[in-house]
Amino acid sequence: MKTTMEKLENSRVRLTVECDAEALEEAIQGAYKRVVKRVTIPGFRKGKAPRKLIELNYGPEVFFEDAVDILFPKAYRSALDETGIEVVDQPDVDIEKIEIGSGVTFKIEVDVYPEVELGTYIGLEAEREKVNITDEDVDRVLRDQQERFAELIVVDSRTDVREGDYAIIDFAGYLDGEPFSGGAAQDHLLQVGSGQFIPGFEEQLVGMNIGETKDVVVTFPEDYHAEHLAGKEVTFKVTVKELKERVVPELDDDFAKDVSESASTLVELREEIRKNLQEEAERRTTIALENKLLDKIGEDSKIDLPQSMIRHQAEHMVNDFFMSLMYRGISREGYLKATNQTEEDLISQFEGEAARRLRHDLILEAVAKAEGITVSDEEVEAEIDRRVADNEGHEEEARKYFEGQKESIRLMLQRQRTMQTIVDSAKITEVEPVKEDVPQDAE
């Protein structure tokens, strides 16, 4: 077999693979064993007709499809071995010529792993935002924690419903004087003013008293999902049974013990929060800096990404996105319907970031090769030990899992080390973070 290769744009190549007459004849002999079981020749049982008679009745072309199925995988593997290319997608194949006594020629186009012509990656200049954690930042987290630990307490100092109250109500809805499906509930907890019910319902509860029953008349929106209610006026008979209000805990040492495993005083809790905010902010600024540096290297490098790689990466990112939605109780179908999009729309939206991530990975791979950055087996095992230790109580399962991820762990450690090499050589200027302008209320 003879292979010639032509480089096309975007890391795509065209291979011309010529298989001689002997290779085609061997494939046709294999094809005959398949075809003879399918054709009918008078005077012969199925599977027993001679090849010559099949050719006379059907023409020699009857064997070509099966012969190509037999020969192409061998020809393709031979071409890959001969050229040394690494393909990243399935090939597009055309048969340029096929003739008994002459041979067959395949024209193959396929995307290959991109070559990287690295630009400058040492001594780059970049800005990094300073991390300034303020008392206000700590206070904001404390307020959020207070809200998470808030409790609903029965109101016994008054009986009237106010905006923001949590009212326990019974209600029953009537359309044209008749109850309708889904329009009734008992002991329903509703925060008045939350907008949980249709417009006009909650506003009419304000001023009611515990034990009072009232007719609440509302009109469903024209675009309401239940067509038999859309645009219709209905009456709800509502009874207020109990009032509760949301009470946040006091900021004191007891609160600190409740929300933290390590802090025993409010002062210690504030210090813990500040430390966590500092670490998270530094992590974000580090990632931002690394992306800036990799983007700069990318601008000075030549990387022709094949579309198939971008597509596969975007599909992977979309699947990760849907997985994150699933953990929040949102289905793939529900999200697409709510946003009026198709999965193809999402993939297209992700392709830009997918290409960026691929460029970053290829740059790190090329820099690691240029700098001779490697990771030893001992370093991989040490990382596995660290990860196993983080899975206290599940060490055996964790070790089994991570032992199967050795090469992924090695690649991750190599990329980290390579990125650190780029950062260490860079000239970093620390700048104040850019704050968004917050409009002030007119006085």
Image (spheres, grey):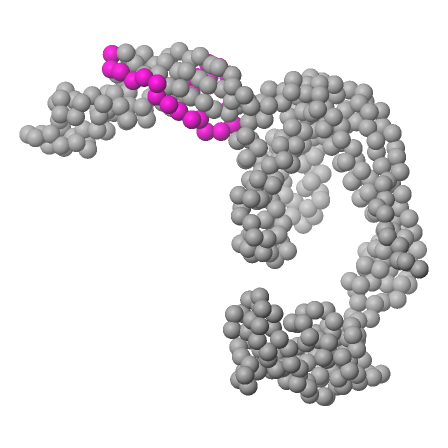
Q: Residue lying farthest left?
A: 43
Q: Position of residue 148 (x, y in %)?
A: 78, 62
Q: Is residue 255 above or below residue 394?
A: below
At 72% from the left and 79% from the top, the residue drawn is: 204
426 left or right of 390 in image: right
Which image quadrant is residue 116 in?
top right
At 89% from the left and 54% from the top, the residue drawn is: 440
Q: Position of residue 401 (x, y in %)?
A: 60, 41
Q: Is residue 232 above or below residue 368?
A: below
Nearest to the observer: residue 53 or residue 441: 441
Q: Position of residue 172 (x, y in %)?
A: 60, 82
Residue 79 sits inside the magenta stretch = yes
At 44% from the left and 26% from the top, the residue drawn is: 91
Which image quadrant is residue 366 in?
top right
Q: Quadrant of the N terminus?
A: top left
Q: Quadrant of the C terminus?
A: bottom right
Residue 308 sits inside the magenta stretch = no
Nearest to the observer: residue 200 or residue 357: 200
Q: Which residues are magenta?
A: 77-101
At 35% from the left and 16% from the top, the residue drawn is: 105
